[in-house]
Amino acid sequence: MRGSGMSFMDKLAKVLGNVATRINNLRYIMVIKNAFAALIPVIITGAFGTLFSAMVFDSENGLAQISYLRFLEELKPIASAISYVTLSFLTIYAVFLIGIELAKLNKVDGVFPGIIAVMSYLSVNPTVYELVNENQTVIVENVLAKQYTDTKGLFLGMLVSILSIELYCWLRKQKKLQLRMPDTVPTNVSASFSALFPTILTVSGIAAAGFIIKELTGMYLYDIIYNVV
């Protein structure tokens, strides 16, 4: 009986291992895995910033509550800034890296696909807000709320990044969209112009899709995904 049990567990482990291997080899899982592996230093740096802010520089719960270490409280903005530029922008960094990694799989090198992914993601999020203060409505424009850049926006960021880069790479392969420059034009300039129409169509398409969804549902993509998923 004991041997039979071990045999079953071995078979189960083998089956689960095969399933995990297949999932791990899916192109989008590989892309996301590689992107977050590259983000490990950012995440750890942000964690240290948060730790020092709470445990060292805080005057209520940290070392700064000790009278002769009270001067540490003045250094708290340093830790807060570190935490802000890392964890509060994690989605932006992830979108950028996912764009680059996915483009590599599609035989498109360079960091420009990462910029495409970031532009596409930002285009589906609101930048105009109505703030009510003492029965007075104030319209704030050209701002991006924190929830769209920190970890709350990761799922939407990954989705938009994958869609935009797949579309961009497909458009790059369409010869009708490639601008042919004279041989005298430098290679880097020629490459930039060849990406012109795919860039315009990609960002415009993603932005239009976000606008249509907002008009049909009354909610932005972030709200739909965050509330439903």
Image (spheres, helix red, strand yellow):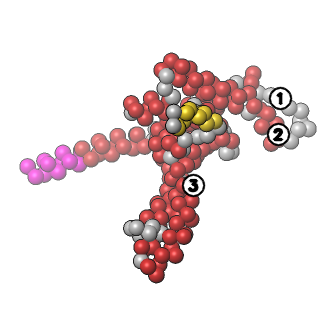
Q: Is residue 98 visible?
A: no
Q: Position of residue 130 (x, y in %)?
A: 55, 33
Magenta span: 1-11
Position of the C terminus, as image quadrant, is top left
The alpha-carbon separation of the residues under discs 3 and 2 comes to 32 Å
Q: Position of residue 45 (x, y in %)?
A: 52, 61
Q: Secondary structure at mark 1?
A: loop
Q: List the residue tagged with mark 2.
A: 189
The kind of secondary structure the magenta stretch mainly shows is helix
Residue at (33%, 45%) from the top-left corner?
A: 17
Q: List the residue tagged with mark 3.
A: 85
Instruction: Name the amino acid type tagged 3.
Output: Val
Residue at (55%, 33%) from the top-left corner?
A: 136
Q: Earlier in the sequence, mark 3 or mark 2?
A: 3
The alpha-carbon separation of the residues under discs 1 and 2 comes to 11 Å
Apparent side of residue 51 relative to residue 12 in the rendered image (left or right): right
Residue reaching furthest to the bottom: 68
For residue 180, which numbered disc appears in the image? 1
Mark count: 3
The alpha-carbon separation of the residues under discs 3 and 1 comes to 41 Å
Instruction: Name the amino acid type tagged 2.
Output: Val
Q: Secondary structure at mark 3?
A: helix
